[in-house]
Image (cartoon, grey):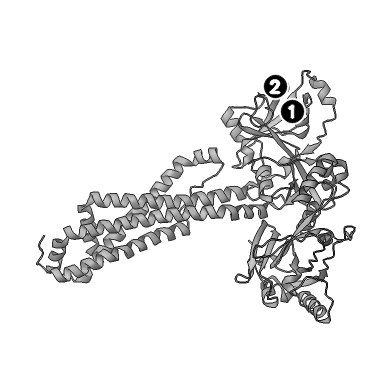
Amino acid sequence: MKPIRFALLASLTAAPLWAQETREMDAHVHGVSTLELAVEGEIIEMNLMSPGMDLVGFEYAASTDADKDKVEAAIRTLLLPENVIALPKAAGCRLTEVLAHLHAGDHDDDHDDDQDDDHDQDAATEAHSHDDGDDHAHTEGAAHSEFHARYIFACAQPQELTTLGFPFFERFENAHEIEAHYVTATGAGAAEINRSVAKLTLD
Amino acid sequence: MILRLAIGSLCARALTVGMTILAIALSVALFLGVEKIRTGARASFADTISGTDLIVGARSGSVQLLLYSVFRIGNATNNVTWDSYQDIKSRPEVDWIVPISLGDSHRQFRVMGTTSGFFEHYKYRGGRALEIPEGHGLEDLYDAVVGADVAATLGYAVGDPIVVSHGLASFTAHDDQPFRIAGIIAKTGTPVDRTVIVSLEAIEAIHVDWQSGAKSGQITPREVIRDMDLTPTAITAALVGVKSRLQVFGLQRWINDYPEEPVLAILPGVALQELWQIVGVAETALIGVSAMVVVTALIGMMAMIFSSLNERRREMAIWRAMGARPSTILGLLVLEAMLVAAAGALLGLGFLYLGLVIGQPWVDAAFGIWLPIEPPSPRDALALGFVIGAAALTSLFPALRAYRLSLADGMMVRI
C-alpha cells in the first residue's frame, strides 16, 4: 500500500516528473492463459500467452538440464499449432506463420526491447496471483516467465470458422483456463475456455 | 369423450378453477416477462454500438469506460489529454478516431461534444448509421444536433435555441451562449436519442468565460470567441476504428502500455460480455424467483384438486358404477389439471403481450430498453410446455389418491 500512496503523492507534487518514471504492474495469473484471436477476411491470427507455471511447472530461469529440456519440449509443442488449437476442417486453413518463445521473467527497469508490441509485458513488473485466489504480490525480483505463441492461418472458407477446439489442455496438464478475446466480422467478444469446455464458439 | 367430461367438470367448478387459472397465468406472465426483459435489455445494449473497434478513455475498468462513454451511465474518472489523443490518432493502425467530451447537460439530457466524424462512424444495430431527417449535422460553432427523445420530450424543432447547463445537476447555465438546433436525429433506440450533440470546439467556447468552475463576470462577445483557438485540452473518451482487425489487439496493447498517461483501450464487445458476467448473477436470481412463483402456483393447483377430491368422491363412485375403470378416473384428473395449466399458460401469454403493449413505450422512455413484441420464442414455448408437464406431474398425487379411493369406496360412500 505504501508505495502506492507515495506514488499518488508524487503524482500530485511532481506531476511533470511523472512521465519520466512510471511504475506499472501487469497481472499474471497462474492457470490462466490469454488468447487473442482476430479474423480479417481470410486471415486468422491467434496470440496465446501462457504462464510458465502452466506449461512447464516452474517460472524461474531454467538452469538445470532437466528444466531446459522442459522448456524446449514446451516450445516444440507450441510450434505445432495442432497441439494447441483445432480449426474446423471445412474452413480449409493453411498455416502461414508460427512463432513460439519464452519471455524470461527478469525485470530490469531499463529493459527496453520495444521492437514488437507483443514484447512489452516483460518490461513491467508483474503482479502475481494464483488461480485459487491467494493473491500475493511479489515485490521484487519475482521471476515470472511467460510463453508466447502466435499462429497465422489463411483460410479458404473463413465463414466456416465457427467452433475451435483446444487440444492445448491435453498437452499441458497444468493449464486450467484460457481467457479468449476475439474480433470477427460480426464484432468483438470474450469467452472462457477451460478443460471441461475446451472449445471456443465464434458467432 | 373424456375430454368433454373434463371440460364439463371444470366448468361446474368455474370459480375455484378460475382462480387457479388466474394464479398460474400471473406466474407464467411473470416468468416470461422476466425473460423478455432480460433478452430485451441484452439486445438493446448489444445493439447500441457496432463498427467501433476500440474505445479509449482514462484507465479505469473496461465496464465503467463502456458505460460512461457509450451508455452515458456514470461519469468518467478522468479525462484524456488532447496530446495523448493526438498520439493515438497518429498511430498507423488507426483508420478513424472520434473524440467525445461529456460533462454538461441540457435539462435531463447529457450534452456530448464531438466532431462530425461521429455521425459518419458511429454505428448501431449491426452497422446502421445515424440519420438526420430534419436539418443538418454540425456545421456552425453554435449548432446542436439533438436526439429523437430530446426533441420529443422538450418539443424542439429545427432552429430553436437551447441553453446548455454547466455540469450535470447544476443551476448555472451557459445562457450567455445559446445554441441553435441544427438537426434532429431519427430514433435509434440507443442513448443517442437522449443526447444533445455539439461540436468539441463549442464545449470549449461555452467555457471561455468560466474560471475555476464558476462563471466570471465578463462576457466575451461571440465574434471574439469564434476567432479564438478552441482546441480542447482534454476529452472524455474516443471511439477508434482500425484499418485491419488483425491490428486491434496490437493497438490495444500499445494504448494500455502508453507510458505518458494512464489510458485504457477496450473492445466494446468484450466489455459488454464482462458486464453480462456481472449482471448474470442478478438475472439468474430473478429467473429463479419467478420460477419459484410458477412452482407455487402449481402447488396451489394441487391443493385445489386435493380439496375437491372429497366433494367429488360420490361423483367418482358413480363413474365407477357406470363402468369407468380406475385408470379412467386417474386420466380424468390429470387431464383436468393439464387443461387448467394450459388455460393458465395461454392466459399468461395473453397477459404478457397485454403488458408489453402497454409497457413498451414507457420502458423504452424510462430505461432505454426496447422490448420487441414478437411471437413467442421456442424458449417461451418450452417454458409453457414445461408448466403443463409439471401440472400433469403434480396432479398425479391427488389423481393417485382418487384412483385408490375409487377402488376402495365403490358405491359405499358416506359423506
**Residue under pointer 1:** B213
Task: Give the spatial CA distance, label 2 vs label 1.
Answer: 15 Å
Q: Tell me where residue A134 appears, x and y as whole percent.
A: 66, 62
Q: Which residue is mark 2?
A: B175
Identity of the amino acid at label 2?
Asp
Residue under mark 1: which chain is it in? B
What residue appears at the point 42 percent right and 56 percent down from the top-left corner? Answer: B291
* Disc 2 with disc 1 on a shared chain: yes
Please rate how many residues cluster around mark 1, counting C-alpha atoms within 10 Å: few if below 14, some from 14 to 19, many from 20.
Answer: few
Residue B33 in the image, given as x and y percentages of width and height: 45, 49
Q: Is residue A7 above or below residue B174?
A: below
Q: Residue furthest front?
A: A2
Left or right of B132 on screen, residue A66: right
Q: Is residue A59 above or below residue B373?
A: below
Q: Nearer the viewer, mark 2 or mark 1?
A: 1
Q: Residue at x 72, y 76 (%)?
A: A83
Quadrant location of the C terminus of chain B in the rendered image: bottom left
